[in-house]
Amino acid sequence: MNDIYIARTLESPEVDFRFSQNVLTIAGEAYPENAAHFFQPLLTGLASYLKSVDGRDIEFNFQLTYFNSASTKMLYSLFDLLNESACTSNRVRLNWFHDEEDDTILDFGHGVQDDFSALDFRPVTVDLSQMAA
């Protein structure tokens, strides 16, 4: 399974899926012109990876500071894949990074926690300037 790395742009997040280390990170802002086009290779790669592992501890680092509604739909597809895997064969920790003053991102995270209860949701408060670096 090849790792996936996509550099951050103004509209799309940095993606660092290190399947070889069971550590998946998405960081920055997500409002690509075509969210489905951007996220589909990630969904395909993640689905393939999750089918190939069993009994693993997987860490998903969510470090987005902004995402639009089209990206939200695709992110929910990612969380669904992770949740299904956590229900059947793997342990998935979702580290949810958010600025202490950003209630919107934290509230969204709590919604994800409610919708995908098999994920080990862990909110992580950080300084927004550190997340943007």
Image (cartoon, helix red, strand yellow):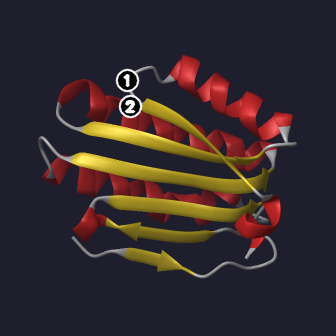
Query: What is the number of the mark on residue 9?
Result: none
Q: Quadrant of residue 125?
A: top right
Q: Residue at 19% of width from left, 48% of height from top?
A: 51
Q: Is residue 86 left or right of residue 40?
A: left
Please say if the residues under marks 1 and 2 sit with CB atoms less than 8 Å apart.
yes
Q: Residue at 76% of width from left, 65% of height from top?
A: 32
Residue 53 percent coordinates (x, y):
15, 50
Q: Earlier in the sequence, mark 1 or mark 2?
A: 2
Q: Is residue 107 left or right of residue 42?
A: right
Check disc 2 and give the amino acid type: Asn
Quarter of the image with the C terminus in it: bottom right
Give above or below for 99 relative to 20: above
Check disc 1 and give the amino acid type: Ala
Residue holding disc 1: 118
Residue 116 percent coordinates (x, y):
48, 24
Q: Residues within 10 Å of mark 1 (few under 14, many from 20)?
A: many
Q: Secondary structure at mark 1?
A: loop
Q: Is residue 89 left or right of residue 50?
A: left
Residue 75 percent coordinates (x, y):
59, 45
Residue holding disc 2: 83
Residue 6 percent coordinates (x, y):
54, 78
Q: Residue at 87% of width from left, 42% of height from top?
A: 101
